[in-house]
Amino acid sequence: MKDEACKSIGLAGTELSRRQTLQIAGTGAAGLIAPGIGTKKAKTKKRGSTMPAAGTLITSAPDLIVTPNTPDEVVLALHRIAFGPRPGDVDRVRSIGLEAYLHEQLHPVDSDDDECDQHLADFTMRIAYPATKQGKDLMPAIDEDRPFTCLNQSSDDLYKLVEGQNRGVNYQEVQRPIEEVKAAKIIRATYSKWQLREVMTDFWHNHFSIDAYIDDPINKVMFPIYDRDVIRKNSLGNFREFIGLVAKSQPMLVYLNNYSSKASPANENYARELFELHTLGAEHYYNDLYQEWSKVPGSAIGKPEGYIDQDVYEAARAFTGWTIANGAYGRGERLPSNGEFYYYDAWHDPYQKRVLATDFDPYQPPMADGERVLDLVAFHPGTAQFICKKICKRLVSPNPPESLVQKAVHTWTTYQKDPVQISRVIHTIVTSDEFKTTYGKGMKLPFEATIAFFRATESEVHPDGGLFGMLAQMGESMFNWPTPNGRPYDASFWSGTMGMVSRWNSMQMLTYGRPGVFEMRDPLPMPVGAGSFDEVCRYWEDRMLGRHLDSASHATLVAHISSPFPTGVPDSGSAPYIDRTKELISLIAMTPDFHIR
Amino acid sequence: MSTRREFLVGCSTAIAAMAGARFGTLAFADSNSSANEEILVFLFLRGGMDGLNLVAPVDDVNYITARTPETMISGSGATAGLPLGNAYPGGDFRLHHSAGGLKELYDNKNLALIHASGLTNGTRSHFEAQDLVDLGVADMDYLHYNTGWLDRLISASNHGSGIIPVVSVGGSVPKSLFGDPGAVAMSNPATFAFYGTADQKQALESIYSGKGLLPKAGAQTIQNLDLIQSKIVKDKNGRPLPYSPTPSVNYPKNSLGNMMQSLAELIKMEVGLQFATVDFGGWDTHQIQGPQFNNQAQELSDSLASFWNDIQQYQKKVTLVCVSEFGRRVKANQSNGTDHGHGNVMLVLGGDVNGGKMHGTWPGLATQQLDQGADLAVTTDYRNVLAEIAQKKYGIANPASLFPGLKSVKEVGVLS
């Protein structure tokens, strides 16, 4: 029984690297070999029964629910490349075709997003703090409903908050830029016409994950720039260009400490995560096998298959001096203080380096070492593999078919210098056959499920701290993931007891609303001419899932909502009708079906 | 309508409780189990705790040379380290100055230290190293298997087969437990509640009765909700009463303090808690290590001391083992921080612990004594400590079998 349960439950870390794929290929044979030293290839031999105590090798993502009614590709797409359908979306996309919808989504037009723009323009969020005395000055108390002010500011303007902090500006003002990005993210995800861009913005924020709340004011105040000019702007663009901007962005320089890295010893934090999390991935970290760069397969011809600690050390040296003009003390002088990226040559380690079997000459021009490292990792085949698979995990399944990953890798590599490389990869994935046959493996993350609820019910949403708190309760405190790996896409992480109960409670809360924050439209939209609870139920299943529930769950829902009214549906629009409908909506939102994609 | 009000009240409480909380984890079992049941707590310090800033030989010239004042324990002055008795020979080993709680536990012989311990695998990736430790393995080939070391201990010892066998204090279950379908994640018993109506819960029970990962997770959640809620002390309006620790115990108001308090509450609820996991992150101190490490060490120290003093009647059966995925580089970097290293210090706290003593072998800090010339060498495979607990507390005759790839176990002597 334990074993059975293990088979169905265990899946955290389901990803199979190339290494594991090779291992599985070898598990059929009978011989045993002790784990230990050897080359990657030697380690692929015949492992299977050597390790019964370790449980079962995880080879595939489990079904989240069994035999769901697989919806058509349009419904699938609206749950994957959008944050769920709004009423009318399914019909519209069916009429123009998925290909045309995808084309539209891959070419967002900023000037054409009226509903979202209106919500952004109308938005206010309270900020309140008491007067504080700072030296002789009294900073006034504030209590106001403030519109977005930081969202579109330049880094010059935002940097004034950092300098202001030294003059007694309240910490809430310093944190306000993050709060605005959070609110704007919810508004855009709910209302923007350009859903795919929002999905990918969320994806890349998670890929280049930053805890915006770490205790450094530059990280906080520059967060709108990171969101706007680094992540959103490049979410469908070119990866090499993208990582170049990330490397020079203030939040990443602060979060992974490169801004304080100087010779010598350098700070390795950014360099390590650049390899492990941003580009090649841990599946290409060969340190357990190789301690000398020349032993890494492919090194002899200058194309090592993976990286080791020595590459991390050397890359860390290459990025020394990449810092922020934050007025810090440099070598006998102070750095400028304007909050921009700054290359400070006095901190740079100028000598020769060797990264990924490539020699760098000493004394290169400013920033040339770092840019060269970025070229090497951006164009490495391991990066194509790691990133394409990760995009597939988000858009398709936590354990995507290898055939699909390879198609994506082919597009990625073919277009690696194309300005819309990422867009082309997404096109390959969404138009693939595999896209249509992989329903029900991925679990929506709490943010996605929440936005899907808003969209399906056409809720009015004015985000505030309470809504951010609700997301945190579900495990997704926005821009606050504590480690640089970002949130996992594996369902096992999100479906623990605490994860389930907090989701159910949140779906309740979303249904019943919070005045002024999120509410379903009043009057509640009603199906026209619904004469029975059965029809009412089908209407909401269609609307919230884009398909019908299995018959047993459907029957349970009908029985539940109709029990106080055995003789029939109360008058549409009456209080009892609304009460029953809300009960129904919250229950549909609590079904497993609402949380899969 | 009253249910809605209750629901809203519950929600705001839950939100307040979540503010600032991070996902961490805990384990518990049959409420009918005998009073002698052991309780094992696996506390994971995620991020690579700098063991050389928590416990170190402050008079070692290699240490003094390699470290900056911000990244080291000092031997004198206002922030001098706290001297430790029964240390490794030849060094003035001290605890970080803000770890007074740990010092007290050590002096009272409840806390044992095993320095220069850790993974024999030299990975410097947080995420690989954490997975290896959670899975109880040292070889990358075992990294994608689906049982954690605690899962294997639970099934081998026939423990944890009760009503709620295993709990993670926090929002999700770590990989040490991820093959256990009975593992319950909860940040706090009082907020582990469904705010809908009984009717709704009944409907959910029926909807979550099918096969697949989510129906199973949902069914398990409903079952555990009922059990926990039935054990929580409530006022006459049915609202959970706040937990009162033993008088004189003041948990620190921070993430680990809250989790250790929830853990003590669960132990005292006598729901048969047997296996608990707790995650405490924030140790990745690549720069400006001084203030951050100080806060972390204090949080760790105060929380463990409060927990220990709060569970007086249960001390005899509790064993808490505290690990991190790796230690940090001996030589500090130019950011006044330390990078990923290797050997580290493990902490074991418990009623049967051979405490007030440093176990294992100190390898020294001279360059030629270091691993790859850079890191504290590992002289004790961390699994030897876990294996000893498995053997002495859970009667596992061949504890090496819990750790795939481990050929034999070498007793550390950490338990009496």
Image (cartoon, rainbow, N blue to C red):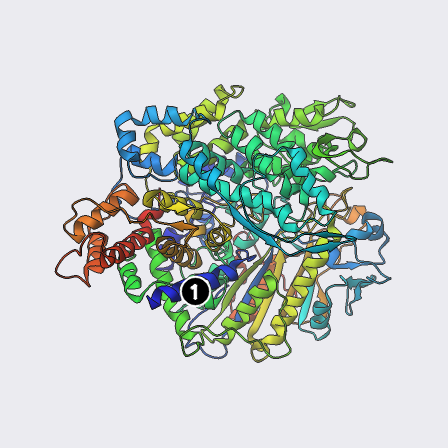
Residue A211 visible to the viewer: no
Instruction: Write down the residue under mark 1.
Output: B10
Where residue A408 sits: x, y (%)? 43, 27
Q: Is residue A523 above or below residue B307?
A: above
Of residues A396 and A534, which is closer to you in this image? A534
> How many numbered discs sit on the rendered protein?
1
Find residue B62 and report its horizontal and vertical position in percent.
83, 51
Q: Assign the N terminus of chain B to one quadrant of the image.
A: bottom left
Badge 1 amino acid: Gly
The residue lying at 70 percent from left, 54 percent from top is B292
**Which quarter of the rendered picture does the C terminus of chain B lie within?**
bottom right
Host chain of mark 1: B
Please state which of residues A129 and A192 is positioned toward the viewer in this rendering.
A129
The spot of residue A166 in percent (x, y) is: 74, 47
A150 vs A212, nearest the viewer = A150
A568 to A335, vertically: above or below:
below
In-image side of B183 versus B378 (left or right): left
Q: Secondary structure at mark 1?
A: helix
The residue at 42%/46% (across/down) is A461
Residue B361 spot, x, y in % from top left: 73, 59
Q: Describe residue A7's horizontal placement relative to residue A268 as left or right.
A: left
Relative depth, front residue between A376 and A543: A543
Q: Residues within 10 Å of mark 1 (few under 14, many from 20)?
A: many
Can the viewer see residue B154 in this picture?
yes
Q: Based on the displayed image, in which of its 4 quarters is residue A373 positioned?
A: top right
Q: In the displayed structure, does residue A318 sit left or right of residue B134? A: right
